[in-house]
Image (cartoon, rainbow, N blue to C red):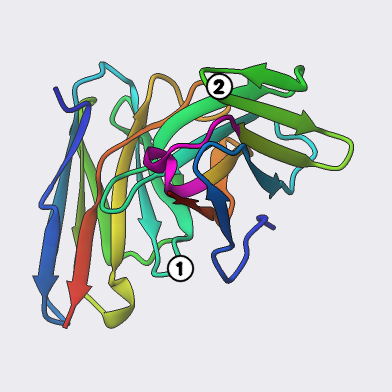
Amino acid sequence: GESVGLHLPTLSVQEGDNSIINCAYSNSASDYFIWYKQESGKGPQFIIDIRSNMDKRQGQRVTVLLNKTVKHLSLQIAATQPGDSAVYFCAENSSYKLIFGSGTRLLVRP
Amino acid sequence: DTAVSQTPKYLVTQMGNDKSIKCEQNLGHDTMYWYKQDSKKFLKIMFSYNNKELIINETVPNRFSPKSPDKAHLNLHINSLELGDSAVYFCASSQDPAGYSNQPQHFGDGTRLSIL
């Protein structure tokens, strides 16, 4: 089954701090993972991706870590800004479909 | 330029009606998708088309009928709307189907469907 929760967890951080958003995925055969950001009234927006042959990938202010042993993915956002406030989803490529996690709401306190 | 565009953005209608949502992508992608996002923000694939051919149908009720007139368009027609159909419907596209090559999908901004 999917790594789905019935509630939307919320992470509240102070502006300027680092944020870490975690995700558990379900299929050990999944070979590609994506993080999306969804702002209110908008569609999911691609942030960063990682293939299963890597354990870390860095972008601008964002880093994705992949731990295949425990089927865990994390998104680190450095120096979090108010514009980072959104719902963040991880997604795994499994059985020729993208399976989305349940999402985490990130709130940035000024 | 909007890469994946959906119309309408909002759709309010009564139970039992038939409605359509349209999607167009200008990215030159071969694959398009429809997703449903419920009130808890859970996002789930409904359909996937590659080069106008249906490749994924996630046991969606047959009241939902997608149509792809060409690679750049994927429409969704819904018959006999029910209360449970209330959700946000997202269209997405990618160059190849998920799993064929590792590329992200690009999403439109959604159509919020409300059934009265």
Which image quadrant: the N terminus of chain A? bottom right
Residue B86: image tag? none
**Residue A75 sits in quarter:** top right
Q: Chain of mark 1?
A: B
Q: What amino acid is at disc 1?
A: Lys
- Percent coordinates x, y for residue A104 in the rendering: 55, 54
Question: Nearest the camera: A49 or B87?
Answer: A49
Q: Are marks 1 and 2 in contact (CB under 8 Å)?
A: no
Instruction: Check chain identity for marks 1 and 2: say if they share one.
Output: yes
Residue at the spot of label 2: B100
Question: Nearest the camera: A22 or A83?
Answer: A83
Residue at the spot of label 1: B40
Residue ID at (59%, 51%): A101
In the picture provided, is B82 more to the left or to the right than A110?
A: left
Residue ID at (77%, 41%): A72
Instruction: Say whether residue A78 is magenta.
Output: yes
On screen, residue A33 above or below A19: above
Segment tinted magenta in the rendering: A77-88
- Percent coordinates x, y for residue B5 in the rendering: 17, 36
- Percent coordinates x, y for residue A109 in the rendering: 47, 52
Question: Nearest the camera: B55 or A33?
Answer: A33
- Which badge, 1 or 2, is on the more N-terminal residue? 1
Q: Chain of mark 2?
A: B
Residue ID at (39%, 47%): B47
Q: What amino acid is at disc 2?
A: Tyr
Which mark is in front, 1 or 2?
1
Q: Secondary structure at mark 2?
A: loop
